[in-house]
Image (cartoon, rainbow, N blue to C red):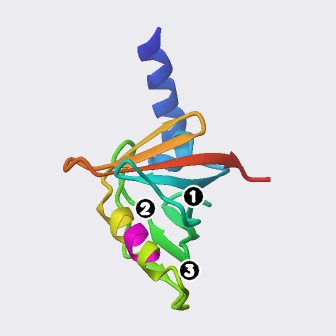
Amino acid sequence: MRKFGIGLILVLAGCTGDEGVRAFGAADMAWNLKSIDGTAFDARATLEFPEAGQATGMGPCNRWSASQSAPYPWFKLGPIRSTRRACPDMDAEQRFFMALGDMTISEVSGNVLVLSNDAGREMIFQGKAVE
C-alpha cells in the first residue's frame, strides 16, 4: 500500500512538471530557519518555493532568490542572487548563505523541512502556511 501512495505522489508531481521539493510538501509554506548543523540560528532567515524551479526568501539582512533544479529529494540551488544591504548581522547572513549553498538533499515532513548534505551538514526549517 505504501509503494502505491509514493508512486501516486510521483505521478501527480510529474503531471505538474514540478519535480522539486515544492511538489513534495514545500509549496505554499514560509520556511523559517531554526538551526544550522545542530546550533540554533537566532537571526531571521526564510525560504519559500513560490513556483516550480524557484526558491526565494529573506536572509538576516537581504532578500534573495535562486533557481532550484534538482528533483526531490535532491536539492540544488542555482546561483543565489541577493540584494546588497549592509546590516549589523552580516556574519549570520554569511553563515546562512554558505550553508544554503552546501545543501544537496531535502526532506519534507509536515511542517519541518530538513536540508542536508553527505558531509553531515544540516539546516532545519519550520514551516507555516502562507496566507
- Mark 1: which amino acid? Phe
Earlier sequence position, callout 2 versus callout 3: 3
| Foreground residue among 45 and 92 | 92
- Mark 2: which amino acid? Gln
Q: Secondary structure at mark 1?
A: loop
Segment tinted magenta in the rendering: 93-97
Give the overall secondary structure of the magenta segment: helix
In reply to whether residue 54 is colored magenta, the answer given is no
Disc sitting over residue 96 in the figure: none
Residue picked out by circle 2: 68
The crowding category of the residue bearing disc 2, from other C-alpha atoms within 10 Å (few below 14, some 14 to 19, many at least 20), is: many
Using residue 15 as the reference point, say whether residue 19 is left or right of it: left
Residue picked out by circle 3: 61
In reply to whether residue 94 is colored magenta, the answer given is yes
Residue 63 falls in which quadrant of the image?
A: bottom right
* Farthest right residue in view: 131
User: In 3D space, how far apart are the residues under numbered discs 1 and 2 (Cα atoms)?
Assistant: 9 Å
Image spot of residue 67 (x, y percent): 44, 68
The crowding category of the residue bearing disc 1, from other C-alpha atoms within 10 Å (few below 14, some 14 to 19, many at least 20), is: many
Residue at position x 54%, y 40% in the image: 112
Q: Secondary structure at mark 3?
A: loop
User: In 3D space, how far apart are the residues under numbered discs 3 and 1 (Cα atoms)?
Assistant: 19 Å
> Do labels 1 and 2 touch, CB within 8 Å?
yes
User: In 3D space, how far apart are the residues under numbered discs 2 and 3 (Cα atoms)?
Assistant: 22 Å
Residue 73 falls in which quadrant of the image?
A: top left
Residue at position x 55%, y 65% in the image: 45
The crowding category of the residue bearing disc 3, from other C-alpha atoms within 10 Å (few below 14, some 14 to 19, many at least 20), is: many
